[in-house]
């Protein structure tokens, strides 16, 4: 049986740099919300729980996440003050308290992350002598237009 996995999905971002009032993760790519892609990528890993970190009044994000893969246990966690990525993860701490297994932290606005990539990251972490923490990143040819 595979080791237990939980996930924290960071999805509290606003769409301000996108010049939109819509939460960033609700913008569509390839016909579905960004957050739907992120949740679908987690589904094959069979996470026991997903803590979805959202901002206040972002019920539509929870609905989109739950609609993406209805069988998953998605627990909304509200980040009342947006004080960065680390702060967002800390908000989800109570939602995964007592969980025995690996906790995967991912973003709700990365629609191109594949399940296989997430699985390889978990496999590397779980390997004998593997790291306590792993990070998956990228090196774009031109990082200028990517985020801030």
Image (spheres, rainbow, N blue to C red):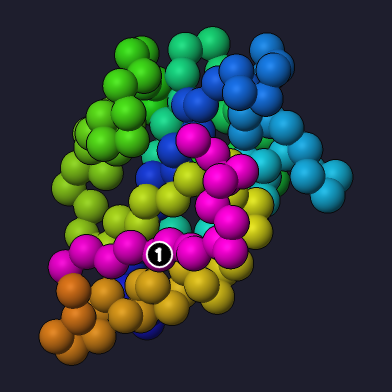
The span shown in magenta is 132-148
* Residue sticking out furthest to the bottom: 128
User: Is 35 placed left or right of 137 in the picture?
Assistant: right
User: Is 128 placed left or right of 140 in the picture?
Assistant: left
Residue drawn at the location 22% of the way across and 64% of the way down = 133
Residue 139 among magenta residues: yes
Q: Which residue is mark 1?
A: 136
Q: Give the camera-side residue of 15 and 92.
A: 15
Q: Number of callouts in the render?
A: 1
Can you say which quadrant of the picture contains the N terminus? Answer: bottom left
Residue 109 among magenta residues: no
Q: Give the camera-side residue of 57 and 100.
A: 57
User: Is 49 placed left or right of 68 in the picture?
Assistant: left
Residue drawn at the location 69% of the way across and 17% of the way down = 19
Residue drawn at the location 44% of the way across and 38% of the way down = 10
* Residue sticking out furthest to the right: 31
Q: Give the camera-side residue of 89 and 45.
A: 89
Residue 126 image offset from top left, x and y in percent: 26, 79
């Amino acid at each position: 049986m595979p080791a237990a996995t939980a996930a924290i999905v960071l999805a509290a971002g606003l769409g301000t740099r996108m010049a939109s009032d819509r939460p960033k993760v609700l913008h569509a790519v390839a016909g579905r919300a960004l957050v739907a892609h992120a949740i679908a990528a987690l589904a094959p890993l069979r996470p026991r729980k997903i803590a979805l970190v959202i901002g206040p009044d972002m019920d539509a994000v929870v609905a989109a996440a739950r609609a993406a893969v209805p069988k998953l246990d998605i627990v909304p966690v509200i980040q009342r003050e947006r004080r960065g990525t680390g702060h967002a993860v800390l908000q989800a701490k109570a939602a995964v308290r007592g969980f025995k297994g690996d906790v995967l932290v991912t973003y709700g606005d990365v629609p191109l992350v594949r399940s296989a990539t997430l699985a390889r990251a978990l496999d590397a972490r779980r390997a004998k002598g593997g790291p306590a923490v792993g990070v998956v990143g990228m090196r774009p040819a031109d990082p200028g237009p990517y985020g801030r």
